[in-house]
């Protein structure tokens, strides 16, 4: 529902821009730097937005051929984690699983500004915006049983015949606010969910295997031994999500040509 709402706003904004009776043309190129936080929603943290936030950062290039829309290429780094011990739910406390994972992302998104915006222009100095696109990310959940963090995918903790892929696709989308901070600089504040197609960001998805495949005990860490083979270890009906949010500092690069006005 959240993803559909953002995509609806993005498409509505694009149609509104195409329906304008006059078109303003200019080219603006920006180099931007992102700093903020990252977190995840999944089986170990099913509802806690901003819970277990870890520092995140990134860099991107933005190309704006119009006051109302732009295209962006970027790379981000973050970290996600979850721990059943932090839950208020009895079944999670009993399950006693945890993980931590570095997160590397490359993305390509399109942005729509709700009002005209351009760095260095006092008449168009701020706007709300939405964005959507495609991304790819690298993750590798790990946990510690006393010998340092170890990759959980190596142990096939739910009896998989093969390990899940560490590189996956995602759909980044979100909302933000842009503001001029100088003649050649701007800042923005952004919150961006990432819809994934995997349920293994946290190495938890289905049921306990009939035969545990790892000798180090990563599969079953239940406190009172209540977990039995075949019982539910996670929720396989939902996919995991990860999120980036924070502030960006944007620097306008050399303009290709001056802004002009012409009728359609």
Image (cartoon, rainbow, N blue to C red):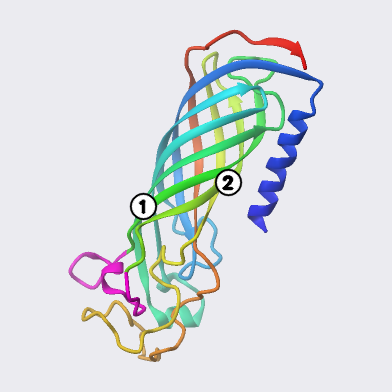
Side of 62 where 3 appears, left or right: right
Determine the residue located farthest toward the right in the rendered image: 21
Categorize mark 1 by other alpha carbons within 10 Å: few (<14), some (14-19), many (20+): some
Residue beneath disc 1: 138
Residue in the image at 70% along x and 16% along y: 24
Where does residue 158 sit, x and y in percent of width and height? 36, 78
Whole-number angstrom distance, CA of label 2 to CA of label 1: 18 Å
Residue beneath disc 2: 173
Quarter of the image with the N terminus is bottom right
Categorize mark 2 by other alpha carbons within 10 Å: few (<14), some (14-19), many (20+): many
Q: Indicate whether residue 144 is drawn in magenta.
A: yes
| 89 versus 79 height, above or below | below
Where does residue 156 sit, x and y in percent of width and height? 31, 74
Where does residue 139 sit, x and y in percent of width and height? 36, 56
Determine the residue located farthest toward the left in the rendered image: 147
User: What span is colored magenta in the figure?
Assistant: 142-162
Q: Quadrant of residue 155?
A: bottom left
Mark 1, secondary structure of its residue = strand
Residue in the image at 17% along x and 69% along y: 147
Marks 2 and 1: CB-CB under 8 Å?
no
Q: Nearer the viewer, residue 115 or 200?
A: 200
Number of numbered markers: 2
Quarter of the image with the C terminus is top right
Mark 2, secondary structure of its residue = strand
| 124 versus 160 height, above or below | above
Where does residue 163 sit, x and y in percent of width and height? 32, 68
| 116 versus 44 height, above or below | above
Q: Which mark is residue 114?
A: none
Residue in the image at 45% along x and 88% along y: 231
Q: Quadrant of residue 212?
A: bottom left
Q: Nearer the viewer, residue 230 or 98?
A: 230
Side of 229 where 217 appears, left or right: left
């Amino acid at each position: 529902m959240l993803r559909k709402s953002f995509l609806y706003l993005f498409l509505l904004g694009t149609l509104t821009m195409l329906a304008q009776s006059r078109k303003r043309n200019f080219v603006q190129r920006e180099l931007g730097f992102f700093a903020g936080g990252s977190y995840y929603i999944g089986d170990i943290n099913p509802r806690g937005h901003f819970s277990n936030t870890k520092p995140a950062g990134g860099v991107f290039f933005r190309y704006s051929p119009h006051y109302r829309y732009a295209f962006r290429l970027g790379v981000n780094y973050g970290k996600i984690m979850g721990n059943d011990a932090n839950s208020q739910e009895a079944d999670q406390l009993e399950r006693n699983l945890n993980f931590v994972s570095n997160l590397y992302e490359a993305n390509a998104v399109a942005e729509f500004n709700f009002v005209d915006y351009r760095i260095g222009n006092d008449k168009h100095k701020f706007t709300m915006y939405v964005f959507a696109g495609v991304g790819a990310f690298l993750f590798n959940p790990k946990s510690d049983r006393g010998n340092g963090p170890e990759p959980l995918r190596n142990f096939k903790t739910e009896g998989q015949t093969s390990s899940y892929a560490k590189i996956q696709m995602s759909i980044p989308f979100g909302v933000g606010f842009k503001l001029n901070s100088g003649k050649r600089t701007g800042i923005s504040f952004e919150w961006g969910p990432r819809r994934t197609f995997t349920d293994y960001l946290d190495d938890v998805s289905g049921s306990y295997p009939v035969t545990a495949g790892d000798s180090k005990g990563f599969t079953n860490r239940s406190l009172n031994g209540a977990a039995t083979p075949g019982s539910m270890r996670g929720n396989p009906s939902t996919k995991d999500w990860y999120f980036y949010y924070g502030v960006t500092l944007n620097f306008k690069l050399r303009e290709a040509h001056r802004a002009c006005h012409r009728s359609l």
